[in-house]
C-alpha cells in the first residue's frame, strides 16, 4: 500500500513531573521526554539500490545505497500523484552505478528495472538524481511504499525564519545499514542526530568521491556509515508543544566527512531539500507531468467502452515498464 506523508506525526513518550508555578506552588505536568516514536510509515519511504536487476533479486548480493519516494500532486488531475525515486547522483550514476531500486512488496520484494539513463541529475551538479517511477495512478496494495510531498520540504526561506529552523534541531535519517541491510526484504534502520551547521554558499563542502565538487550542505552531528547515501533526512522540533509534531524533509544524505587520516569525524553532509525542489521543477519534469495529466484527463473523458490510443512512447524495456506500472496502478492511494 502506498500512503501519503502528511497523515503521520511523531509521538513522544510522556510522564508526570512536578514543576512550580510563578508563585512557587507545586504543579503536576504531563511532560514529554526522550526521543519520539518514529512511525513505521517512514521505513516504507525508502528503497535500496543495486547495480543490476539480477543483483536486486539475489538475497546474497550487495546493495550500494538508499533512495526514497516523492509524490508530486497533479494540477490538472487533482487526484493523481506523480511518483519519483530520489537518491544521490553518485549512487545511481558515477562512480557507483547502482540505478536499480528494490521495494518491499507483500512478503518479498519488487525490482524496478531502471538504468543509469533513467535518472536525471541536478542541472547545477548537486549530488541529486530523480527517476520517474509511475505512469498511472496505482490502486492496489502490492508494493509497500510511502511518499513525501513537496509541501513537507524544508525551503530556503525557513532559514530566514529562525527560530523556525536552526542549529541544534533534532534530525533522523532512514536508510540502509550496510552491515545489517536485510536479506529477503529491505530492512532499513534509523540514525539520529542534530543540525550542526547551516548551508552557506561561501562555505560549500568538497566531495572527494565526486572530484572535489563543492556541495551546498547542511552539516549534521550524526552517526553514519556507508549505505546511507541517498537517504532522506527529516527534521523535527523537540521543543514543540502538543502530543505530536510533524517532521519535514531537511534533505538528502550524501556522505560522512573524514579527517586527513581518513577517520570519520561524526559530521555528515546533507543536500538541502530545496535543491530537490529545483530538480523537480526543471522543464523535463514539468513537461512530463503536464503530458501525463493531459493524457489521463483525455482517457477519463472518453465514453465508456470506447477505444483509446496511448500516445506515450514505449519504454526501453516495455515488458518491465508494463509490469511495474500495473503493480503501481494498484498500489497508490492518493491523499484524501
Image (cartoon, rainbow, N blue to C red):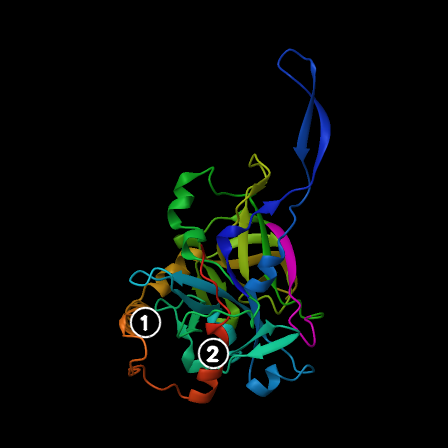
The percent coordinates of residue 25 (x first, y second) are 69, 13
The percent coordinates of residue 278 (x first, y second) are 35, 61
**Image height of 243 relative to 204, above or below:** above
Q: Counting residues from the N terminus, which is met first, the one under dot 2 or under dot 1?
A: 1
Please tell me whether mark 1 sits on a helix, a strand or a loop: helix
Q: Quadrant of the C terminus?
A: bottom left
Give the residue displayed 49% in from the left and 79% down from the top: 324
> Which residue carries the number 2 mark?
326
Please name whichever residue, 234 or 197, is drawn nearer the observer in this view of the structure: 234
Q: Main secondary structure of the magenta part?
A: loop
The residue at the far front in this view is: 305
The percent coordinates of residue 313 (x first, y second) are 32, 84
Horizontal arrangement in the rendering, residue 168 relative to residue 178 (left or right) = left
The percent coordinates of residue 13 (x first, y second) are 69, 41
Estimate how packed mark 1 is, as few (under 14), some (14 to 19) or many (20 or more) residues with alpha carbons within 10 Å: some
> Which residue carries the number 1 mark?
296
Please name whichever residue, 129 or 187, is drawn nearer the observer in this view of the structure: 187
Horizontal arrangement in the rendering, residue 310 relative to residue 275 (left or right) = left
**Image height of 266 relative to 229, above or below:** above
Q: Is residue 187 magenta?
A: yes
Q: Can the viewer see residue 293?
A: yes
Please name whichever residue, 80 or 236, is drawn nearer the observer in this view of the structure: 80
Horizontal arrangement in the rendering, residue 240 relative to residue 284 (left or right) = right
Please tell me whether mark 2 sits on a helix, a strand or a loop: helix
Please tell me the numbered disc located at residue 175: none
Horizontal arrangement in the rendering, residue 221 relative to residue 289 (left or right) = right
Q: Can the viewer see residue 211?
A: no
Q: How many marks?
A: 2
Residue 12 sits in quarter: top right
Q: Which residues are magenta?
A: 181-193
- How far apart are the two marked residues, 2 and 1, measured between alpha carbons? 15 Å
Amino acid at each position: 500500500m502506498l500512503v501519503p506523508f502528511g497523515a503521520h506525526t511523531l509521538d513522544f513518550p510522556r510522564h508526570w513531573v512536578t514543576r512550580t508555578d510563578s508563585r512557587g506552588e507545586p504543579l503536576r505536568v504531563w511532560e514529554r521526554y526522550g526521543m519520539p516514536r518514529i512511525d513505521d510509515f517512514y521505513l516504507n519511504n525508502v528503497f535500496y539500490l543495486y547495480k543490476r536487476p539480477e543483483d536486486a533479486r539475489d538475497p546474497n548480493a550487495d546493495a550500494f545505497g538508499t533512495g526514497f519516494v516523492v509524490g508530486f500532486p497533479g494540477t490538472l488531475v487533482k487526484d493523481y500523484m506523480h511518483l519519483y525515486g530520489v537518491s544521490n547522483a553518485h549512487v545511481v550514476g558515477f562512480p557507483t552505478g547502482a540505478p536499480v531500486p528494490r521495494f518491499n512488496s507483500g512478503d518479498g520484494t519488487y525490482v524496478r528495472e531502471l538504468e543509469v539513463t533513467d535518472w536525471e541529475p541536478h542541472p547545477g551538479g548537486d549530488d541529486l538524481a530523480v527517476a520517474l517511477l509511475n505512469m498511472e495512478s496505482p490502486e492496489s496494495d502490492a508494493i509497500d511504499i510511502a511518499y513525501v510531498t513537496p509541501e513537507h520540504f524544508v525551503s530556503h526561506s525557513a532559514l530566514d525564519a529562525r527560530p523556525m529552523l536552526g542549529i541544534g534541531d533534532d534530525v533522523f535519517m532512514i536508510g540502509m545499514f550496510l552491515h545489517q541491510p536485510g536479506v529477503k526484504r529491505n530492512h532499513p534502520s534509523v540514525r539520529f542526530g542534530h543540525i550542526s551547521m547551516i548551508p552557506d554558499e561561501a562555505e560549500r563542502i568538497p566531495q572527494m568521491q565526486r572530484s572535489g565538487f563543492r556541495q551546498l550542505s547542511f552539516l549534521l552531528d550524526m552517526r553514519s556509515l556507508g549505505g546511507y547515501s541517498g537517504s532522506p533526512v527529516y527534521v523535527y522540533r523537540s521543543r514543540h508543544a502538543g502530543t505530536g509534531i510533524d517532521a519535514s524533509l531537511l534533505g538528502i544524505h550524501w556522505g560522512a566527512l573524514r579527517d586527513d587520516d581518513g577517520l570519520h569525524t561524526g559530521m555528515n553532509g546533507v543536500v538541502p531539500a530545496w535543491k530537490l525542489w529545483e530538480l523537480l521543477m526543471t522543464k523535463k519534469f514539468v513537461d512530463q507531468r503536464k503530458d501525463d495529466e493531459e493524457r489521463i484527463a483525455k482517457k477519463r473523458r472518453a465514453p465508456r467502452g470506447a477505444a483509446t490510443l496511448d500516445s506515450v512512447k514505449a519504454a526501453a524495456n516495455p515488458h518491465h515498464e508494463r509490469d511495474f506500472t500495473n503493480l503501481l496502478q494498484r498500489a497508490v492511494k492518493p491523499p484524501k
